[in-house]
Amino acid sequence: MTERYFTLEEAQEIIPWVQSAFDSIHELSSKGIESRKTASALVEKMQSNGGSQHDEELNALQISVQESTTVMQSTLDEFASRGIIVRDVQRGLIDFPSLREGREVYLCWVDGETTIEFWHEVDTGFPGRQPL
């Protein structure tokens, strides 16, 4: 059993924050991927010419990746502190624990949906989504 259950209205009120949080996560993830690619290419370049003239640039890229990772983790921690279950970060798939007919279920939302329109049993996951 979970510590917190959401009504549909409570979960619906949080959706603007959720969408904004996933927009931020996706932006940070893209930035991190690009920084990693740039750093990897820089390391190859440094190894091929034997120089360390790019140390500062490489260090800055590594710091950027770490900062992005820290902010993303902080955002994911915020989901958890609110009682929201993140199922898939890339897809933006989350569940809100809820009660339906006296049993625990999940209100299900995926990035891009404007409202919560589906729910599923705790043991069926996304494939078991049913309309509200």
Image (spheres, rainbow, N blue to C red):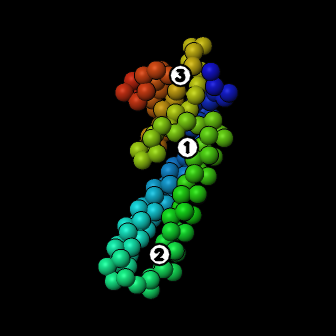
Compare marks 2 and 3 and give the one earlier in the sequence: 2
Q: Which residue is mark 2?
A: 58
Q: Secondary structure at mark 2?
A: helix
Q: Nearer the viewer, mark 1 or mark 3?
A: 3
Q: Secondary structure at mark 3?
A: strand
Tell me the kind of residue under disc 3.
Val
Q: Which residue is mark 1?
A: 15
- The number of discs equals 3
Figure quadrant of residue 96: top right
Q: Are marks 2 and 3 in contact (CB under 8 Å)?
A: no
Q: Are marks 1 and 3 in contact (CB under 8 Å)?
A: no
Label 2: how many residues lie within 10 Å, few (<14), some (14-19) or many (20+)? Answer: many
Image location of residue 15, percent across then percent down = 55, 43
State the residue in front, 19 or 36: 36
**Residue that extends furthest to the top in the rendered view of this protein:** 102
Compare marks 1 and 2 and give the one earlier in the sequence: 1
Is 3 rendered above or below residue 28?
Answer: above
Residue 128 is left or right of residue 122, and the answer is left
Figure quadrant of residue 63: bottom right
Quarter of the picture holding the N terminus: top right
Which residue is drawn at the image coordinates 38% and 69% (left, top)?
40
Is 100 rendered above or below residue 73?
Answer: above
Q: Secondary structure at mark 1?
A: helix
**Residue that extends furthest to the left in the rendered view of this protein:** 48
Q: Which residue is mark 3?
A: 105
Q: Is residue 131 among what the camera can see?
A: no
Image location of residue 107, percent across then percent down = 52, 29
